[in-house]
Amino acid sequence: MHPRAAVLPLLCALFLLLGGSSASAQAAPLSGFDDYVHTALREWNVPGLAVSVVKDGKVVLSKGYGVRKVGESAPVDAHTLFSIGSISKSFTALALGMLVDEGKLSWDDPVTQYLPYLQLHDPYVTRELTVRDLLTHRSGLPDVSGGILWYGSDYSREEVLKRLRYIKPVSSFRSTYAYQNVTYMAAGEVVRAVSGKSWDDFIRERIFTPLGMKDSNSLYRDLKKSKNLALPHVRIEGRPVAIAYRDSDALGPAGSILSSVQDMSRYMQLLLAEGTLDGRKLYGEKVARELFTPQMSLPIPPLTRPEFKPIDPRFRAYGFGWFLRDYRGRKLVSHTGGMDGMTAVVMLVPEENLGITVLSHQDGGIFNALALRLLDAWLGAAETDWARVLLKYRAEGEQQAKEAEAALVAARVQGTKPSLELGRYAGNYRDRMYGDLSIAQENGRLVLRFSHSPSFTADLEHWQYDTFRLHWRDPMNFPKGFLTFALDARGKLKGFAFDQPKLLDVNFDELTVERVAEAR
C-alpha cells in the first residue's frame, strides 16, 4: 500500500464535512456506466451516441460511444454533431427571453404587432394571439399542425405561416394543449422582426458564440461543411441503415439545430446558472424563472406499465420550450427531440444543479433509457435497467404493428377493381392549404407527387375498390398508408382522401384534396 493511501479516506471525509465535492463523489454515479452503454448499443443495435453530464457547474462527463455511421470506423466523440430536433425550441424561447430582458418586447405582446401577415382560421384568435401563446402550444390548432407544409418542402418559413389560415381549430383558444412546430416557427420570425436578424443569426451571435458552442449550427448549408457528423439511421428489417440529412431550414426555430454534447454541456451550465456563465450575463434571473415556470397544464396519462409506477408524475406542465414534471420528489425540466433518424433528450434538475444530455441515432428509446439511468444514479434511486425495460416495450410495439398489418391484409376484399381505368385517375389535384399535387400513370401504375415536397412521392398499389396502398419512396421508411378516390353520383372523379399514419410531425388528415378541372 502506498503510504498516502491510509490518509485518503480521512481527507475525503473532512472535505465533505466542509461542504466540498470530492472527485470520487462525482464519479460514483458514473460507476459502470461505460459498460452499460456498450451493452445497450449492442442490444438495441444502435451505431452510436453521445452523453454529457454537468453537476454543480462542472462537466463530469462528455463522451461519445460507437460510430458515426454503421459499417464505418469513424468514432463518435464529444464534438460529433447530432440533430437535437425539438430541443431547438428552448433556444427560440431563450432568444425571445433575451429580447424581453432588453425591453424590446413583452411575452404578452400581440403576435400581429410583429407579424401582420399571420392569420389563423379564427379572426378572434388572430387578434388575441400573443408571444406567450406561441410558446405554450395552446392556439387551438390540431396537434402538430401544418407539418405537411414544412417537412422536406421548398416553402419558406413565412410562406408556411401564411398558409396556416386554412387549418381549422379543434379546440377553443387557450383551453387545450396540442403540441406545435409552426407556432415556434412564428416565434422565430418574431425574433427576426424585433432584432433585425434572422433567427439563425441571432442564436449563433447571441447564444452559440458567447457560450463557445463552436460545433453547433442550424442551417443545412453549414451542416454540409461539418467534418465530424453522425449520420441519421433508420431501422429496416431490424437493422440500422444510414440515410442522408434532409434540408430542414424551413423548420428552423422549431427543430433545425445540430449540436454536440460538448456544446450542450455549455448550454446546460448556462440554464442551471440562471443566465450567467463564466462571469458573463446573457439574461436575467426573471427570464430564467419564467422559462421554467408552468405556463400550460398537461394531462397525466394513465399508468399502463408497472415499471413506471415509481416515476409516475403528480404534475405535468409546459413552460417556455420545456416540459415540466416531478421526478422522485424533484422538479424535472426536460425536452426530447426527434428528426429523421436522430433522437435527443436534455434533462435538468435545478435543485440538484444537475443536467444530462443524450444524443443518439434514431431508435425508439435508448436515449431516454440512458438519461433515466444517469438521473436515477445521481438522485440515489434504486437501479432500474431502463435500457432493457424500454427495449422490451419496443419489441411489443413492433409485434403489435405486425399483427395490425396482418389484420389489414386479412380484411382486404379480394377480386375488386377500380371504378375507372387507371389513366383516368391521373391528373392535377389541389389542397387549399398545401397547394398542388399530381398523379401520373407510369409503367402501368399510378404515382403520387406533392409539388413542393419531393419526399412525398408514392407508388400506388391497388388495394380494393377505389382504394390504393401508398408505398412511399423516401428512405426514411415511412409507414404505408392508403389513398381513396371519391366519385360523384355521375361517376366523375372529385378528389381523394388519405388514410395515412402520421409521419413524424406530419398529419395528412389536414388535407382536403380536390381534382383540378382540365382546361378546355
Image (cartoon, grey):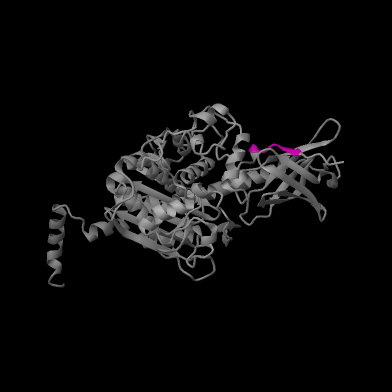
Q: Where's residue 295, x and y in %?
A: 40, 34
Q: How many marks?
A: 0
Q: Which image quarter holds the C terminus? A: top right
Place residue 308 in its image quadrant: top left
* Left or right placement of residue 206 versus residue 443 in this view: left
Q: Which image quarter holds the N terminus? A: bottom left
Q: Camera-side residue: 30 or 150?
A: 150
- Looking at the image, the residue that sits furthest to the bottom is 2
Question: Residue at position x 58%, y 31% from top?
Answer: 169
- Looking at the image, the residue that sits furthest to the front is 196
Q: Camera-side residue: 354 or 302?
A: 354
* Left or right placement of residue 424 versus residue 10 in this view: right
Residue 387 visible (yes or no)? no
Residue 295 visible (yes or no)? yes
Q: Camera-side residue: 448 or 135?
A: 135
* Left or right placement of residue 37 versus residue 442 in this view: left
Question: Residue at position x 50%, y 62% from top?
Answer: 230
Question: Residue at position x 40%, y 56% from top?
Answer: 208
Q: Camera-side residue: 501 or 305?
A: 501
Q: Is residue 488 above or below residue 31?
A: above
Q: Is residue 393 magenta?
A: no
- The span picked out in magenta is 510-514
Q: Where's residue 138, x and y in %?
A: 49, 33
Q: Where's residue 35, x and y in %?
A: 38, 62
Q: Where's residue 18, x and y in %?
A: 13, 53
